[in-house]
Image (cartoon, grey):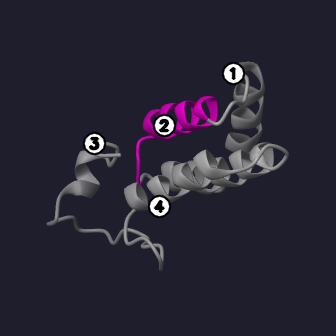
Amino acid sequence: VPGCVPKAIANPNRSRPVHEHTFSGSAESFLQNGLTMLQRESEGNRNNTLYNVAVANFSNAKKGEIEESCVRSEIERAAMQSGLPISEIKGVLESAYSSAIS
C-alpha cells in the first residue's frame, strides 16, 4: 500500500513520534496486514473482519498516520474482492469510521 502515509509522516526528520504497531512497524504495513486478513476471510466472518480492520485503520487515519482516503479505498477494494456487495461494504465502513478513535 505504498503512498498512503502523509508526506509529513513519511519524512524521517519528523519532529513528532508516530505510533508504531508492535507487529507491523508502520501504518501502511498495518493496513496491508488487515487487507490480507480480509481477503482470506471465509463467508460468514467477512463483515466482522471488515469492521475490525476498518476501525483499526480509520483510527490510524484520524491520528494522521495514514491517509483516510487511502484506507477507505484499499479496504473497499479488498472487501469487494472477498465477495461482499458494495452497499454492504459502504455501510460497514461508515459505522467503523464513526467508531474509530483518534
Which residue type does callout 3 highlight?
Gly
Q: Please give the residue where the numbered disc 2 appears in the rendered image.
A: 74
Q: Quadrant of residue 59?
A: bottom right
Q: Which mark is residue 30?
A: 4
Dominant secondary-structure state across the stretch colored magenta: helix
Q: Please give the residue where the numbered disc 1 appears in the rendered image.
A: 86
Gap in angstroms between the C-alphas marked 3 and 4: 14 Å
Gap in angstroms between the C-alphas marked 4 and 1: 23 Å
Please say if 43 is above or below 57: above
Q: Residues within 10 Å of mark 3 (few under 14, many from 20)?
A: few
Mark sitting earlier along the chain (4/2): 4
Q: Quadrant of residue 101?
A: bottom right
Please say if 2 is above or below 27: above
Gap in angstroms between the C-alphas marked 1 and 3: 24 Å
Q: Is residue 52 magenta?
A: no
Q: Please give the residue where the numbered disc 3 appears in the rendered image.
A: 3
Gap in angstroms between the C-alphas marked 2 and 1: 13 Å
Question: Quick check: 89 left or right of 15?
Answer: right
Mark sitting earlier along the chain (3/4): 3
Mark toward the viewer: 1 or 3: 1
Q: Which residues are magenta?
A: 65-81
Mark sitting earlier along the chain (2/1): 2
Q: Residue at x 43, y 36 (%)?
A: 70
Residue 75 lies, in percent from the top left, at 56, 39
Which residue type does callout 4 highlight?
Phe
Mark sitting earlier along the chain (4/1): 4
Q: Residue at x 27, y 42 (%)?
A: 3
Mark sitting earlier along the chain (1/3): 3
